[in-house]
Image (cartoon, coloured by chain):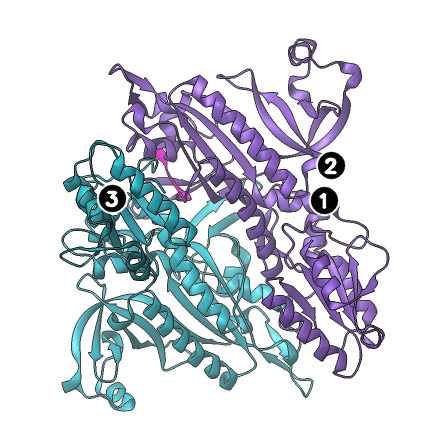
Chain colours: A purple, B cyan
Amino acid sequence: MLQSALFTKTRKEAPSDEVSRNAELLIKSGFIHKELAGVYSYLPLGLRVLKRIEQVIREEINKIGGQEIWMSAIQDKVLWERTDRWDEEKVDNWFKSELKAGGQVGFGITHEEPLTRIMAGNVKSYKDLPTYAYQFQTKFRNELRAKSGIMRGKEFLMKDLYSFCRDEKEHEKFYEKVITAYKEIFKRLGLGDLTFLTFAPGGIFAKFSHEFQTISSVGEDTIYVDEKKGIAVNKEVLNDEVLSSLGLSRDELIEKRAIEVGNIFKLGTRFSDALNLNYTDETGKSVPVFMGSYGIGVSRIMGAIVEVLSDEKGIVWPKSIAPFSAHIISIGADDKALKVAKDLHEDLNKKGIDALLDDRAEMSPGQKFADADLIGIPYRIVVSEKTMKADGFEVKGRTEGKGKIVNREELFNILKS
Amino acid sequence: MLQSALFTKTRKEAPSDEVSRNAELLIKSGFIHKELAGVYSYLPLGLRVLKRIEQVIREEINKIGGQEIWMSAIQDKVLWERTDRWDEEKVDNWFKSELKAGGQVGFGITHEEPLTRIMAGNVKSYKDLPTYAYQFQTKFRNELRAKSGIMRGKEFLMKDLYSFCRDEKEHEKFYEKVITAYKEIFKRLGLGDLTFLTFAPGGIFAKFSHEFQTISSVGEDTIYVDEKKGIAVNKEVLNDEVLSSLGLSRDELIEKRAIEVGNIFKLGTRFSDALNLNYTDETGKSVPVFMGSYGIGVSRIMGAIVEVLSDEKGIVWPKSIAPFSAHIISIGADDKALKVAKDLHEDLNKKGIDALLDDRAEMSPGQKFADADLIGIPYRIVVSEKTMKADGFEVKGRTEGKGKIVNREELFNILKS
């Protein structure tokens, strides 16, 4: 894509009321636009990243048998009253609205209730189980404060997966599969080394739930990490009994701030009991379905990546989710460099490598380099008098200090690595 | 995909309050679930279709230079007050809600206002124009009645494209390009022959707007079609002066009911004036940007296709958007046919042809055939004692009366055609 055609521009300043580093950088680089406190729109570069994060998650969830669906945002009050999650005193972050035709609706804060009802219409026998359904859907939460950019918004994109099993044993097996899938997802997203499986409060049906926490000084949670064992404990459940049951020792734990990028819950029969999701087992008996839920904050991950991987110059996107693989920059007043750069751009396209070409005429090399660092595409490729004389291209990784001149073949090998 | 693993089941009945043919068929075949009047969730088969429709539209809009974005659903009241579209007396189908932090928000009925504001932060000079941005986003409209299934919901998926030009002349050029792109989209979606470019009321800035109307007895609009010229006039603007200006004659027009599947509007400077979207022209003068908007109802198209292309046995999906390309059905009590069917399924997958394999053990051939007709996948492939004896497969197009036995190579050629 030609950068001159991109309608967004980089800018020196984010809105003065923006206090989070992630939103500040994403606004300055033109990835997102702030509509209201905690409400953001995704511009061309930002949507590309969001879609790539989504696709990584989709691939891994499909591998463990998830079936993708897309549930409505508008929620049926009746359904949520049956699980006692409608009343403001129980759940205080609903956006509710009046129907013209009479009655009240809410905008989905989560989707256990509607999916349980959908399953109640489809699951009859033990032969229909286990089954797993997930979606990428906007969640609406009426947050009182919104100071974390796209990491905690009033409107955000979430992947939510739900499992429906015959019993707890079958549930446990899938639960472990999700843990493995989540680890692979965070690894692919470039957060693997910073993200820890964390023991957290379990609720009625389990001793623990599990969170995936990414270490960051701006995280809202406090966790205690055992780096050798690669696991952590949320402060909320930290006590001697828990530590001994997990085989952990206080001396080995390091206190860290962290961002909750995923969580998984054993729901048991809380929702199937309330909404009559039962199946007939081998003996003809009616049994409630055993459920689990598994979330990943898609837009939150985008924010978390900006928080933990950016540097003083701007964003540093992992290759797996960068808006483009390469950022070609042509330098020089005449059209010679631009022509070579355009040829390269076309060549890369043909090879399936998507590149952004900075063809902007009035920009100085310094401005172009600063914008490239701010936008954070993994490789910068310079075409200039100097590189043309050497019959090559200058390529530099986003976090490398200096570029090197390589020929076309070497360049392709670097970009494909 | 194995049909036994699909969590949805076909069913004999749709909810008794469902009056539309499209929702009735889509519910019975397991594509969608009704949450509330006018609110539907998309189940695995339904989401596949919706995504394919989306992808056809995306490809054609990208070709004419559209840049994809994704704006928030939550809307800033202040913005809509500036264009006088907040007040209930002016716009009566908002879903509005109270912010916990104080103040009121709406859920996006359309997105001219927020995009105009975004552009005001990016467009400065004539060099930044023209530019085009679009999105696939849920729209929320507080409809009093919802009797048309997914053709008119309280929550629906729309593609909305907006153009930003220097002047009316530049706008007209892009407007014509959109007409051409829309024609290609409806052709690819299998609605080409039934869909007419229709002259409709234009508003302040234009004599006409243009609708794309698909002929259907359940359509909400009345249009007058000149079949020879391939255009139509909406009843709302039908008069002698309009006919003569379009070179149409009353005698040549046929009255039809039709579904509005797309519309395009010249917005002029209505929004840029109200929201200060100006650019500096070549002479240094500040000029308001000239805008257009172009909608296509993605979920509505899915409903329209069901309305106009289904038959008494069920849905008939066009190949371009079918949930799968082929529906393999294995028949026989022993596992022999199932094994051959699974081999074929794997073979097709390798060739990039996605198939649904009906491997359900307890179903009679009659039930399987009835389900296949209801679901509406373009090709049904039967594997049975008879076809194995002939060393082939029985293939039948969804609307064909009888299948024919072909060998593997012939089968691939048919499926790839």
The answer to whether tags 3 and 2 share a subunit is no
Residue type, numbered disc 2? Ser
The answer to whether tags 2 and 1 share a subunit is yes
**Helix, strand or loop under label 2:** loop
Whether residue A91 is visible: no
Q: Residues within 10 Å of mark 2 (few under 14, many from 20)?
A: some
Q: Chain of mark 1?
A: A
Kindly indicate whether the residue at mark 1 contacts the one at mark 2 (C-beta within 8 angstroms). Answer: yes
Whether residue A269 is visible: yes
Label placed on residue A293: none
Q: Nearer the viewer, residue B92 or B187?
A: B187
Residue B403 percent coordinates (x, y): 17, 55
The residue at which mark 2 appears reads as A216
Label 1 and label 3: CA atoms lie apart by: 51 Å
Q: Quadrant of the N terminus of chain A?
A: bottom right
The answer to whether tags 1 and 3 share a subunit is no
Instruction: Determine which quarter of the picture holds residue B52.
Output: bottom left
- Residue sitting at x 28%, y 70%: B213
Classify B39 as above or below A27: above
Q: Which residues are magenta?
A: A70-77
Residue type, numbered disc 1? Glu
Q: Chain of mark 2?
A: A
Label placed on residue A307: 1
Q: Residues within 10 Å of mark 3 (few under 14, many from 20)?
A: many
- Residue sitting at x 66%, y 78%: B125
